[in-house]
Amino acid sequence: MLGYRFSNYTPPPDQAKSDFEKLHKIFMQLVLITAGNVAEALQWLTELDKQYKLTSDKYGIGDFIEQLKRDGYISEDGPKGELNPRPCWCSSPTSAYHPS
């Protein structure tokens, strides 16, 4: 007689993803939750890092923020130097969806 064999779930290793990719995924969800408030999203990410140790000594939250700036995800264009999200691909006039 055939039956079911149950065992503990072992998730696949995330070794293929870089530290930036892991943090970026969480950061983008936090930006969505905070309605585009980059500073608040980074505060939440810092708190999550303290609680769950998302970063290492080699790559910290400061490195992540600098890479976000370098890669063009965020900018300090505000009048007081606030961090702002950069326009996404969907706001370009050549994209498939462009509200007029």
Image (spheres, helix red, strand yellow):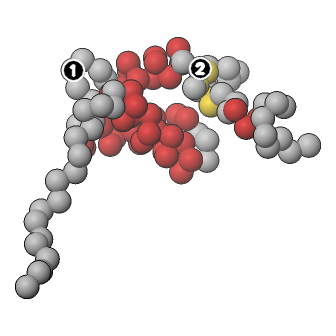
The residue sitting at 10% across, 72% down in the picture is 5
Q: Which mark is residue 72?
A: 2
Query: Label 1 is placed on what type of residue?
Result: Asp
Q: Is residue 40 visible?
A: no
Q: Position of residue 20 (x, y in %)?
A: 39, 27
Label 1: few (<14), some or many (≥20) within 10 Å? few
Q: Position of residue 37 (x, y in %)?
A: 58, 40
Q: Decide if residue 35 is on the left or right side of residue 30.
A: right
The residue sitting at 61% across, 41% down in the picture is 36
Q: Which mark is residue 57?
A: 1
Q: Toward which corner of the image does residue 71 lie, by quadrant?
A: top right
Q: Camera-side residue: 15 or 29?
A: 15
Q: Toward which corner of the image does residue 58 lie, by quadrant?
A: top left
Between marks 1 and 2, how big is the CA–CA gap? 24 Å
The residue sitting at 39% across, 38% down in the picture is 45
Q: Is residue 74 visible?
A: yes
Look at the numbered disc 1 and give the secondary structure of its residue: loop
